[in-house]
Image (cartoon, coloured by chain):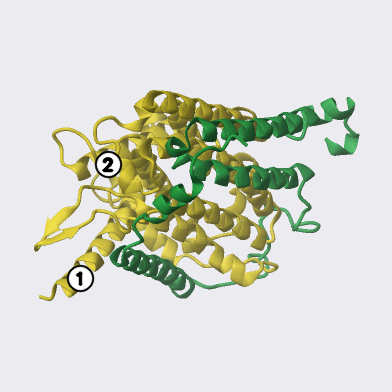
Chain colours: A green, B yellow
Amino acid sequence: MLASPNWTHLAAELSGEAPLDLSAGLSLLLYTGLVVGLVLLLMLLAAKLGHKSTTPAKREPYESGILPSGEARVRGPVPFYLVAVFFIVFDVEAVFIVSWAVVYDRLGWAGFAQMAVFIGVLFLALGYLWKAGALDWGPRAGRKAGGKLPEAGR
Amino acid sequence: MNPLWLGLVLTAVKLVVVLAALLTMAAYMVWVERRLLARMQLRLGPNRVGWFGLLQPLADVIKMLAKEDTVPAQADRWVFLLAPAVTACMALLTFAVVPFGPPLSLFGQEVPMVVSDLNIGVLFFLGLSSLGVYGVALGGWASSSKFALMGAVRGLAQLISYELSMSLALVPVLMLAGSFSLSDIVAAQAEVPFVVYAPVSFAIFLVSILAESRRTPFDLPEAESELVAGYHTEYSGMRFGLYFVGEYINMIVLGALTTVLFLGGWHGPWLPGLAWFLLKVGALAFFFIWVRGTLPRLRYDQVMHLGWKVLLPLALVNLLVTAGILLGVRA
């Protein structure tokens, strides 16, 4: 391991950070109450004040004027699920990077080297995804994967 | 009066003023955008209600409250009804950690010009912006309409993709300030704003917040020409209004955050702090509108390409280079 800084010392130093003072917390709580109250009031007014004349045709989902057809909850294309998985992978990494950012000067070059290795590994992962075509959208993805797109997929 | 009570009253008054100012600014941002956009397209824009059309936002609110509140037949009723509140609430709550001026002395008490100076302000902002995604996702899903669902799925993928580069672009700012508190970040920029030290971060952050606020050229979740109105297709009246105004509140709040994180916050010569803050936020809002008047909408694969293949690697390289330079200089 490259680590040389004194971890226990660093932890003690960091725990000395000023705790959240009461007035700031109270202020945030009051503000949250005001915001939520105001938005709920607006929505209540919207429900009560509005003009009402519901007909079955009005309650149909809008599909550019023609009668709605088929299932409304269409299945999403697979790339969207892939994005969700990548997001979780890279967002967890962001947690480590952000927590390193506030103490990077106390960890010095040793911490920097560790972080560089960490980010290097992430780059490898990103490069792999890139090469595998997981980040390609639209027609180009199909061309790269097999050369031909099925007619129905167009 | 008892100092404790005085403090409480001052806080309450401050909160009401902040909220009222924020909502008024958002309402007038709609007016400003419509007028400016009209001028950019050689039109006049709304100019009939009141002097220069200045009462237009008020007329719009009254109109939206009087409209019928429709719920589609197959919709998931309660989720559908409550989803717009999520977007609006998260946008308004984010402003809680933004310092908008130097502390004010009133009746012998120091009133900080920030709703709540959390020591984890940056994390609070990132967390709320993640939660804001739920407004889009739930609203589009609960509508039980194809256009709304497609808009929501697109919005979801776009928002989480750009959130990544947004949070990574903030890392150099955190290094420069050495703190998560936005007040500390502003204090660290008393001499030189961080945009000078971290121009690449500023550029990445600016593009990412354009995508986060779902504005042109990243307005795919509500692309009018293909998805009718995207995730809020089925909404009417004030619930649509909450989505709509939420977008403008978001624009102001994200502009305020950019000001605080990169442009020196309320610091500036000659003018009082609050004036500088409003001026910088106004300039950023003008920039947002200008971009909308200039750029066409991107295609979906281009949006994802820019987020994952350009901004994300750039943000990672940028933060490593910044850390290296800072360590070299400060050692």
**Which chain hosts label 1?**
B
Residue type beneath disc 1: Val
User: What kind of element bears circle 2?
Assistant: helix
Residue type beneath disc 2: Ala
**Whether residue B35 is visible:** no
Q: Which residue is mark 1?
A: B9
Q: Residues within 10 Å of mark 2 (few under 14, many from 20)?
A: some
- Mark before the other along the chain sequence, 1 or 2: 1
Residue B109 in picture, x, y percent from top left: 14, 62
Q: Residues within 10 Å of mark 1 (few under 14, many from 20)?
A: few
Q: Which residue sits at x=52%, y=55%?
A: B132
Q: Which residue sits at x=41%, y=44%?
A: B254
Looking at the image, is B252 positioned above or below residue B313? below
Q: Nearer the viewer, residue B190 or B96?
A: B190
Q: Which residue sits at x=54%, y=52%?
A: B130
Q: Nearer the viewer, residue B149 or A123?
A: A123
Residue A13 in picture, x, y percent from top left: 40, 50
Residue B122 in picture, x, y percent from top left: 43, 48
**Which chain hosts label 2?**
B
Q: How many marks?
A: 2
User: What kind of element bears circle 1?
Assistant: helix
Q: Which residue is mark 2?
A: B187
